Image: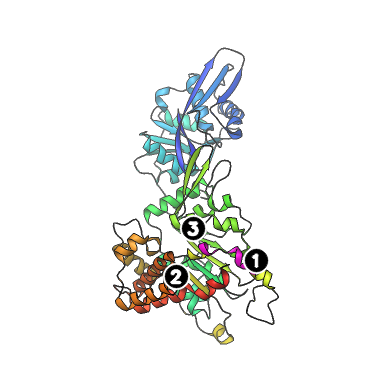
């Protein structure tokens, strides 16, 4: 009997071997299972009896192989029950030879949903099996894997009948996103007033997949702007949607699991989040917020309130697009290709530069600045100040709408995909230095302006390439074939070196 264990973001095949022999009645499960696996003895016993099968009053030993792989969760229940029925002669071994099984059992024999159905289905296809038996609530999710027979069922008895030749309903993959909160469905850029420059920065960030920091006093609209970013992002591609669905399914965030996630994730963790909570880890390593935001947006509000160690842990995920977690002599890789959007106040009270309102001492300002290291800020492409709108601006018309901005963003992304074809990058924000040199054409006057900025010390070597990436996105938005001086100056202005100098230690 074959089932699967979840190992990080992958599924590993697990063979269930059941031995039934004369002796004092007992039921032992070996193979490095956690408490949930050990407790499955009672669930399996009750489910078999309540489903109308006989539970052998003999010495029963179940082995989950390979023994070195840690087994976590209740998803092995169905496999243990099926294996016991085969070993006791109540189910023919030929009936289950070409199928994998996966799911949790209730005491009454009903099947309950388990995390990771999509990853298990992918593992079943890799194993060369004909199909997969699992709870019907996860059947549509598993059916996203082509070339696999999915048998969704509700009880142990029904699962046995299906394998023994019962009527097998066809399961179609639902292509409707049901697990993602519709981040852009009820909010729109049309709600924003008096923020021309931040809105322009938001559109550039969306068009190129760039990281963005908003700095400003409390109540100026930083969070409002950030939460509207998903409403202008392009839709997920088919491959990206599969990746996002797999991650959210493994994390238990895929709702009722009826289809493919089609909206880009938007994650906004609290500032008390730990390092494992942000980048992944824990005793049984699970994806963190950075992986849950894969192909979407990770929003860190009140950036300076996060622990410095937590923020520093983001440096590798931001640079590489993945993070490695080492636990128990094994290394797990979690994808972290997200857009980082952050918001912070210029000082602890939020009113730095306003003498009559700021109550922070020099020591307070120094501690605030030390929270945000130079290396972290250097990985942010756009550093934008958000000012308090005037009364006239608040009464004025909207600068743009999400629909209009999204159309411009999608058009710019199409230009990038055409230009970056054959490279590892899918948008300008993912270009490394080699791809920048190979694909970005800079006009002479723009090259002179960039060289001058670098020679004056305003840019690091990393910042040099990041400015070029942003300038290329500005050119893509206006439909230009190369980076002109106006594009380069726009990119330099959006890095806000003055803001960076105030924030850095």
Give how far across and how far down residue 25 sits, in percent.
61, 17
Q: Earlier in the sequence, mark 2 or mark 1?
A: 1
Residue under the point 37% across and 57% down? 237
Q: Which of marks 3 and 2 is nearer the N terminus?
A: 3
Q: Which colour scheme is used?
A: rainbow
Q: Earlier in the sequence, mark 1 or mark 3?
A: 3
Q: What secondary structure do most residues of the magenta stretch adopt?
A: helix
- The residue closer to the viewer here, 393 or 450, is 450
Structural distance between the alpha carbons of marks 3 and 2: 32 Å
- Badge 2 is on which residue? 459
- Badge 1 is on which residue? 367
Residue under the point 39% across and 41% down? 170
Structural distance between the alpha carbons of marks 1 and 3: 33 Å
Q: Give the range drawn in magenta.
A: 366-376
- Quadrant of image for the N terminus: top left
Image quadrant where residue 55 sits: top right
- The residue closer to the viewer here, 345 or 241, is 345
Disc 2 is placed on an element classified as loop
């Amino acid at each position: 009997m074959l089932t699967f264990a979840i190992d990080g973001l992958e599924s590993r095949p697990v063979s269930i071997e059941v031995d039934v022999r004369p002796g004092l009645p007992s039921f032992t499960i070996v193979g490095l299972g956690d408490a949930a696996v050990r407790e499955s003895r009672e669930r399996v016993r009750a489910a078999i009896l309540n489903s109308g099968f006989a539970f052998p009053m003999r010495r029963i030993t179940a082995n989950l192989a390979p023994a070195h792989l840690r087994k976590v969760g209740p998803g092995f229940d169905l496999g243990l029950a099926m294996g016991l029925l085969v070993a006791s002669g109540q189910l023919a071994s030929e009936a289950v030879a070409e199928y994998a099984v996966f799911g949790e059992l209730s005491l009454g024999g009903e099947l309950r949903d388990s995390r990771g159905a999509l990853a298990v289905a992918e593992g079943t296809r890799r194993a060369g099996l004909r199909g997969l038996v699992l709870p019907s609530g996860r059947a549509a999710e598993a059916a996203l894997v082509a070339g696999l027979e999915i048998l969704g069922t509700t009880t142990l008895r029904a699962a046995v009948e299906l394998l023994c030749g019962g009527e097998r309903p066809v399961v179609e993959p639902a292509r409707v996103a049901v697990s993602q909160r519709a981040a852009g469905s009820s909010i729109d850029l049309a709600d924003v007033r008096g923020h021309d420059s931040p809105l322009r920065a938001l559109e550039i960030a969306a068009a190129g997949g760039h990281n963005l920091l908003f700095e400003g006093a409390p109540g100026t609209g930083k969070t409002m702007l950030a939460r509207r970013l998903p409403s202008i992002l392009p839709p997920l591609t088919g491959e990206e949607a599969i990746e996002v669905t797999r991650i959210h399914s493994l994390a238990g965030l895929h709702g009722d699991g009826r289809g493919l996630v089609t909206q880009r994730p938007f994650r906004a963790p609290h500032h008390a989040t730990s390092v494992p909570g942000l980048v992944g880890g824990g005793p049984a390593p699970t994806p963190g917020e950075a992986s849950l935001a894969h192909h979407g947006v990770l929003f860190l509000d009140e950036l300076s309130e996060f622990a410095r160690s937590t923020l520093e842990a983001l440096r590798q995920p931001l640079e590489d697009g993945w993070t490695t977690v080492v636990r128990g002599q094994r290394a797990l890789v979690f994808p972290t290709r997200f857009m980082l959007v952050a918001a912070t106040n210029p000082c602890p009270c939020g009113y730095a530069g306003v003498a009559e309102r700021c109550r922070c001492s020099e020591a307070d300002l120094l501690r605030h600045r030390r929270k945000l290291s130079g290396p972290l800020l250097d990985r942010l492409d756009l550093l934008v100040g958000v000012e308090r709108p005037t009364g006239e601006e608040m009464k004025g018309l909207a600068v743009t709408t999400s629909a209009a901005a999204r159309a411009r963003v999608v058009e710019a992304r199409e230009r990038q995909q055409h230009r970056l074809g054959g490279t590892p990058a899918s948008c300008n924000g993912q270009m490394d230095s080699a791809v920048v040199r190979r694909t970005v054409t800079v006009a002479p006057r723009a090259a002179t302006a960039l060289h001058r900025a670098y020679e004056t010390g305003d840019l690091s070597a990393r910042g040099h390439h990041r400015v070029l990436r942003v300038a290329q996105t500005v050119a893509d938005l206006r439909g230009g074939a190369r980076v002109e001086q106006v594009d380069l100056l726009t990119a330099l202005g959006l890095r806000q070196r003055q803001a960076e100098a105030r924030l850095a230690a």
